[in-house]
Image (tube, coloured by chain):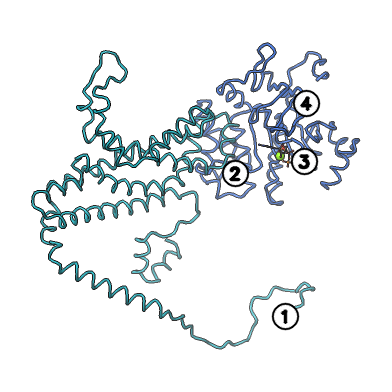
Chain colours: A blue, B cyan
Amino acid sequence: MTAAENTTVRAAPMVRADGIVKNYGKLNVLDGLDLEVDAGEVVCLIGPSGSGKSTFLRCINHLEGIDGGRMWVDGKAMGYDIKGTRLHEQKESRICRSRTGIGMVFQHFNLFPHMTVLENLVEAPRLVLGEKKSVVVQRALELLEKVGLAEKAGAFPRQLSGGQQQRVAIARALCMQPKLMLFDEPTSALDPELVGDVLKVMKDLALSGMTMVVVTHEMNFARDVADRVVFMADGRIVEQGPARYVITNPQHERTKAFLSSVR
Amino acid sequence: MTDLTKTPEKTTFTSPGRTRDHYTVVKAKHPGRWVSAAIIAVFAVLMARSVATNPRFGWETVGLYLREVSIVQGIAVTLELTAVCMAIGIVLGVVVAVLRLSPNPVVRTAAFAYVNFFRGTPVLVQLLFWYNLAALYPTVSFGIPGVALDANAIITPMFAAILGLGLNQGAYMSEIVRAGILSVDHGQVEAAGALGINKLQTMRRIVLPQAMRVIIPPTGNETIGMLKTTALVSVISVPELLYSSQIIYARNFQTIPLLMVASIWYIVVTSILSIGQYYLERRFAKGGQRNLPLTPLQKLTLFFNTHDRLARKGGKL
Ligand SMILES: Nc1ncnc2c1ncn2[C@@H]1O[C@H](COP(=O)(O)OP(=O)(O)OP(=O)(O)O)[C@@H](O)[C@H]1O
Ligand SMILES: [Mg+2]
């Protein structure tokens, strides 16, 4: 926490997590975690199973409430407002509005199975942002083109391969025109030969300047694309820095042990 | 056997030049089926003969009253009651199901209390209660001062019937809808939430449409059940199908023939509803399966058309 208090004034980071604490009953999952992600930065979160990576990611867009600390996204308090010494949970409408600026991609895609690919993309911008149909459809088709699935606009999710579904899920998140994208192990549920297509889309997105926080086990992706790699264990950050240091030349014993186990 | 350790030079398709012996396939015999079929056939014939020859069935009277005006009007009332009460039941069921899944414990408990009360008491008792509401509250004010309506005038038999059956059905439907909602993967709710879609819209646009696949089949069953349950409201003298028949046999004492008339109509209508249910289920199974099985009608056409028709369509229907 001291580090955050001492920072000099500069452009607000896209994500600022200050001493985040999260408990599930007696289990302490996040233990005062600090992290800042600058606009345009790509951060990869790595760490052993159960270390709290998914939990932290879900705290960023308030899919999980927190038990301590503060979270800011794009300069605005996420989930809670300070009143005196207390944190008051925000109203649903406020949280929903904040979430429109944060895209999230899940391990199991979570596409809406009763809608076509195009409908999956168009649904939220229409419903939440109230945008005109023609505008959204136009944008959705462009995004599908970008992820290489223009011809699948009319298909249902079940008719697509896992890799295709995940690319649709990315396009669906992008269709809200978010400022920040969160990825929770986007390629872990895919057959090895389908991983490449998804990573390619993510790499293009990173090159386009999107701010990204990516939980991943793909060390090659982290090495090639991430500006910073953060290694977590037991709800804390153990080591972080440019990929060429953290992955290629880790300093901490736990990082070394983890990296040798995933290879 | 080829040597598996070595990679073969080429893929082989068939072993060339070998002639095979030809066998004829003889299907397994099922003598048990024939015996059971024969026994059932004998019983069926005996029953049909007894039904046809027993004069007390009064088939002529049955024929006479099958299209009697008051009977047909009774069917209309039965259908109307079924439709209205199911509609009330479905709307109430959805609302109560959502309330039962609410994070607010007071709301949740109230919804549970409703379900428990209406499932825990016989519908017949509920109907009698509503019918006799005037005894409990002679005037109804709806909480508005100055308003004092005569309960007897408001609670007509038809109103009591709709209230009783609708509220009772709501309790059952809420359990069905709840099961449907719970069957939808929680990841769907999270994905919607992450897109900024609020809870109410998530329920309406994402969860309920997917819950339909689980909700529709038992709802079809409930509708058929409701059609028959409406016979209960004959006790509060609503002129539905059964009550209309009772009025006639009270006059002419042809009890059995008129009960036959009512039964025949109940069977006819439930059969039609079953067909509707079948097609409705098929419709909502879409997106769930990649290929739907054939309908009986399609099977029948297939049966009467020989293989060439299938071949012409490339094996697809
Ligand atoms: N809803 C929950 N209720 C109780 N415990 C939970 C819940 N979600 C996660 N946990 C626990 O919190 C801890 C951290 O979980 P989390 O999913 O964040 O780990 P992770 O780092 O993403 O692991 P993985 O690499 O396996 O996905 C685990 O011990 C997990 O069992
Ligand atoms: Mg995880």
Residue at position x 83%, y 18% from top?
A2
Q: Single out the mark in the foreground, 1 or 3.
A: 1
Reading the chain from its start, which is encountered first: label 4 or label 2?
Answer: 4
Q: Which of these two is toward me, B236 or B171? A: B236
Location of mark 4 (residue): A32
Q: Distance from label 3 to label 2 (Cα)?
A: 22 Å
Q: Disc 3, disc 2: CB below 8 Å?
A: no
Q: Distance from label 1 to label 2 (Cα)?
A: 46 Å
Left or right for A92, reference B233: right
Q: Distance from label 1 to label 3 (Cα)?
A: 46 Å
Q: Single out the mark in the foreground, 1 or 2.
A: 1
Left or right for A183, reference A240: left
Location of mark 2 (residue): A149
Q: Amino acid at mark 2?
A: Leu
Residue at position x 29%, y 47% from top?
B227
* Residue B175 location (% of width, % of height): 44, 41
* Crowd tier of the residue under label 4, counting other residues whose Cα lies within 10 Å: few below 14, some 14–19, many 20 or above: many
